[in-house]
Amino acid sequence: MRLPSWRHFERKSRYVAALATELGAPFLRVKVPGPVTPPSEWRRVLVLGDHHLGDLLYRTCSFEAMRHWFPNARFTIVTAPGLGAFVADDIEFFEGYQEERRDQITGLETLAETDFDAAICTSSWRIHEDLKLALKLDIPNRAALAHKGFSAWITHPMNPPTAETSMPYAMEIWSLFRQLAQSEEAVPNVLRPEIRLSDNVRSSCAKKTAAWHDAGSQRKHLAVFTTSRQPVEQWPAASFREVVRHMAETDWQVVVFGSAGDRERLETIVAGTSARASAGELSFGELAVWLESCTTALCTDSGPRHLGNAVGTPVFFFRNLRSEPVGTGTYCATETDLVPAGLQTLDRARQAKILAEITPAFVAKQLVRQQPS
């Protein structure tokens, strides 16, 4: 028995809980119908993990490698509602996640109709929820990171990167599939999310945004995203407003995006400028189509950052300062992290101070250059 190391846990309570699962492993073992087999024999594979937009797009970076390493397997990825349309035609999807708990999905009976050979848990966070779901579905092979406890529920343990080999989350997920394939391929320096945009989505976006384009204008287009669902500090709204004002005055067409609930914030940011506020007008797919036509995008560390990466638009973003800098750092050749290097796991007061020190003049200069680094 290998006990988990406290270094892998942000909270002592989670470490104690993981330790308890290892000490109590003999009592946690569950018998599931079906044989434990090597990954090369798997034919129906369920992919589990964090399920918000950015999380899904992180995982799509591995689709090409998955096809290459497991040519005889059919993959199904579980997503949140409305995100399945992004998934490539040869990867099946199941829009079952409704709440934060990943082991409590809607339509479990429908998902159980497929006899999955294996479940691959691609997250290092709340692994036990993915494993519980796999057990509910009687999946005999369960691959997961084994450094945070619950080894009694794992049939194919995988190793996380070490401190010396830490990598962006997109590469970390890619490396999990490499472990299962026992491949010697080197981890790529850059990856890009896969996204499928249907003709219907493109047509719908064109109709909704027809009035946004200035007739005959050759102006450059900037998309701005100022919010995030994550409980972290963001670059100040006043700083966003200053950049929007500067760019709009220098012949850029600027659209500031957010949800319907962000309308007041967006209207404040664009007030007195030629910029447009778009609060909940576009679906994620339509937003990706609009981003595809943009010169560049300015984002928080949220889903639109990854949409921009997927469509190849240069993205400038403010990294999540609650997380490790490598994990949430750049993974795509067309993106630039605007936050100073090396800062990590800061409390909210320190996050706010660091972000406030990033000046609008500096950010505007980076956008004008449009040379991601």
Image (cartoon, grey):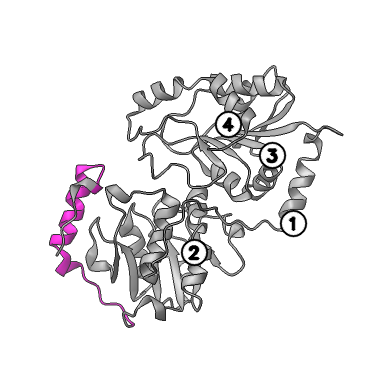
Disc 2 residue type (three-letter): Ile
How far is mark 1 from mark 3, CA to CA? 20 Å
Disc 4 residue type (three-letter): Asp
Disc 3 residue type (three-letter): Cys
Above or below 365: residue 99: below
Q: Quadrant of the N terminus?
A: bottom left
Q: Who's the residue at 54% across and 41% down the image? A: 335
Helix or strand or loop: what does disc 1 sit on?
helix
Displayed quadrant of residue 153: bottom left
User: Looking at the picture, how far across and down is residue 177, in whole percent?
Assistant: 41, 65
Left/right placement of residue 140 relative to residue 369 reads left
The boundaries of the magenta stretch are: 8-34
Left/right placement of residue 20 relative to residue 200 reads left
Q: Label 2: which residue?
A: 77
Q: Label 1: which residue?
A: 200
Q: Who's the residue at 33% across and 63% down the image? A: 144
What's the mark number on residue 262? 4
Q: Label 3: which residue?
A: 294
Specify which label sits upstream in the sequence, 1 or 4.
Answer: 1
Q: Nearer the viewer, mark 4 or mark 3?
A: 3
**Label 3 Cα crowd, 10 Å radius (few <14 / some 14-19 / many 20+):** many
How far is mark 4 from mark 3, CA to CA? 22 Å
Residue 24 is inside the magenta segment: yes
Specify which label sits upstream in the sequence, 2 or 3.
Answer: 2
Disc 1 residue type (three-letter): Asn
Specify which label sits upstream in the sequence, 1 or 3.
Answer: 1
* Residue situated in front as seen by the camera: 292 or 99: 292
